[in-house]
Amino acid sequence: MLRANNLRRSLHSVLNRRHPLKPPPATAASHPSASRPFCSIPTPPPSSTTDSELRKYIGYTLLVLGCGAATYYSFPFPEDAKHKKAHLFRYAPLPPDLHTVSNWSGTHEVQTRTFVQPETISELEAVVKECNEKRQRIRPVGSGLSPNGIGLTRLGMVNLALMDRVLEVDEKNKRVRVQAGIRVQQLVDGIKEYGLTLQNFASIREQQIGGIVQVGAHGTGARLPPIDEQVISMKLVTPAKGTIEVSKEKNPELFYLARCGLGGLGVVAEVTLQCVERQELVEHTYVSNMKEIKKNHKKLLSENKHVKYLYIPYTDTVVVVTCNPLSKWKGPPKYKPKYTQEEAIQHVRDLYRESLRNYRDKLLAFDPLNKEHIAKVNQAEAEFWRKSEGYRVGWSDEILGFDCGGQQWVSETCFPAGTLSKPSMKDLEYIEKLMQIIEKENIPAPAPIEQRWTASSRSLMSPAYSSSEDDIFSWVGIIMYLPTMDARQRKTITEEFFHYRHLTQANLWDQYSAYEHWAKIEVPKDKDELAALQARLRKRFPVDAYNQKRKELDPNRIFSNNMLEKLFPMTETV
C-alpha cells in the first residue's frame, strides 16, 4: 500500500510540474483574468516525493547493471575465439606470439603462431623434418603478393626471406644459381655486374623467386614463355625424400610437374635460372582503337619483343605499349612530346578538384561503384594516355614493369590465341565480348583491362602449358580497386567485383578455354560451384598425377592449406 501511494504521489508531482517558460494550464479554481504567465516562487514539492524519485533512479541503475551482468554470463566470450579464422577489419586483442600475415592487396589475412624463417638450407631441412614428425603444417609463403593469398594458412607457414643470396654465376652459359628467397630486384641488382638479367619480368619486382616460379607468373611477349620456363633446375626440400634436385636430366617427370607446383610438392630452396644479356630497351607508348588494333594485331605480336594492350572501359581507347632492344646503330628515336607532364595530367587533376569540391574525397574512393563516375575517371585516364604518347629508354628491369595501383581485387585468365605465325584473333574477340558485358550490365569497371601474351610453357601445371612450342597464349586481367579502408564499402566493392567476375566466367571462360592465374583464382564458397571448378581443373591439368606426387613427397600434407585441399582434394568428397 505504501509503495502504491508513493507511486501515485510521484506521478502526481510529475504531472503538476510546470515548464519554466510555459504558463500553467487553466483550472476550474483559477479565474481567467487572474492567470499569470509564470510563478516567480515555485511551491516546493513534498519531501516524500524527492525520496521516491531518488529510489526510482537508483532502481533503474541497478536494473541496467543487472541486465549487463546477466548478458555477459549468459553469452560468454568463446575460449577459442582468438584462434578462429581472422576476418579483415575485425579487431580484438591478440596474444603476443600470434603473427598477423596479410597479402599485398589486403584481401586475405590470417593469424598464426607458427611462422618460420630459416637462414640456411640445413635449418630448413631440420624444420621440415620436425614439422613432419609432429604433423605441423608449414605452408611455403613468399612475399605475400598473390591477390588470392595462395600461400597463407593460420596453421603455420615457412618463409625464405632470410635465404636470399646469389650462390653462383655462370657467365659463359648465362646461368645463375640463387636461394629461392631472393627477391627479383635483388637478383637483378646482384647479376648486372656480370652483364646478365632475366629474360622477362612480371609487373612487380618484390616477388621472391621461389614464389614467382611456383605460381606460374609471366611477363609479356608472344615469343617469351612464362617465368617458370626460365628454370633449369631446382632443389626441393620434402618431408618424405629429404632434399632432392630436379632438372630436365634428373627426374624430368617431377621437374616439369614441380616447376609450377603451387608450393604443394616441397619447399623450393634453390633455383638455377637461364639468363640473357643485359640490354637497354626502347619503350613506345601510343593510343589506338580496336579498329586499328585489328588491322595491325598480327604485326604487333610478331615484330615486337614485348607488347601489351591497356583497354579503357567506356571509351574506344586502347593504349599500346611495345618494348624492343635499343639499336646500337640507330640509337634512341628522336621524338619531342606534344605535351609536358603537367599538361598530360591536367585532365585527371581537373576531375580530382571537381570530386573534392562536390564529395570531399578522391577520384575512385568517393564513389567507386557509380558507373557514371567511373566512366568519367576512365575518360580522364584515356586523355592522360593520349597526352603521354612517346618513347623512353632504359634497362629491361626498369622498363618492363607496370604500376598496378593500390589495393585491389583482380582476376586474370589465360587462354590459347593460335600461333605466332597464325594468330586466331580470339584474343581480340574475347576483349570485344568483355566490353559488351561491361556496358550491357553497367559494371563500374575501372581502367585498365590489361592484355598480355606469352609463348607456351612445358610446366604441366602452367595455365599456358602446351606441347607445341609455336602456340601462344593471351592473358587478360580485370580489376576493381579498394580505395577505401571503410569495411562496409570494401565489402560492397568485393560483392560487385565477384559479380563482374562471375559474368566473365559464365559468358567467356568455357567458350575460350580460359583458366585463371594460380595466384588469382578464388575458391568458391558454394559446394556446387566448387565441385564444378574441381571438374573443370581436371580437364586442363594433370590433377591425379599432381596429387600422387603430393602423397609421395608430402604424405602428411604439411605443405598444404585450405586452397590446395579445396582445388585438389585427395578424395572425391569436397
Image (tube, rainbow, N blue to C red):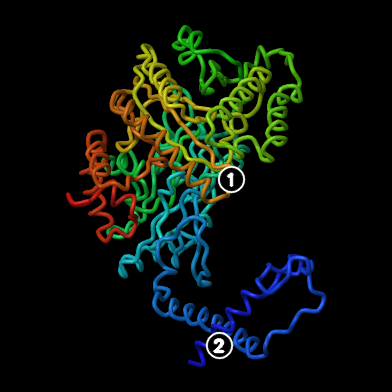
The tally of labels here is 2
- As drawn, is 564 to the left or to the right of 490? left
Classify mark 1: helix, strand or loop.
loop
The residue located at (24%, 39%) in the rendering is 532
The image quadrant that residue 60 belongs to is bottom right
Q: Residue furthest left?
A: 572
Say if 251 sits above or below 467 in the image. Answer: below
Classify mark 2: helix, strand or loop.
helix
Q: Say which label, 2 or 1, has the lower sequence index.
A: 2
Where in the figure is residue 110, as x and y percent of width and height? Answer: 45, 58
Q: Residue furthest bottom?
A: 2
The answer, for residue 468, to whether it is visible in the render is: yes
Say if 395 sits above or below 135 in the image. Answer: above
The answer, for residue 231, to whether it is visible in the render is: no
- As drawn, is 44 to the left or to the right of 225? right
Say if 444 sits above or below 470 in the image. Answer: below
Residue sitting nearer the eye, 516 or 91: 91
Residue on which the image places disc 2: 6
Q: Amino acid at mark 1?
A: Thr
Label disc, if present, on residue 484 of the rendered structure:
1
Q: CA distance from mark 2 to mark 1?
A: 58 Å
Say if 27 sits above or below 162 in the image. Answer: below
Neighbour tally class for label 1: few under 14, some 14-19, many 20 plus, Cα within 10 Å = some
Q: Amino acid at mark 2?
A: Asn
Look at discs 2 and 1 and give the one toward the viewer. Answer: 2
Where in the figure is residue 143, as x and y percent of width and height? Answer: 51, 50
- As drawn, is 332 to the left or to the right of 152? right
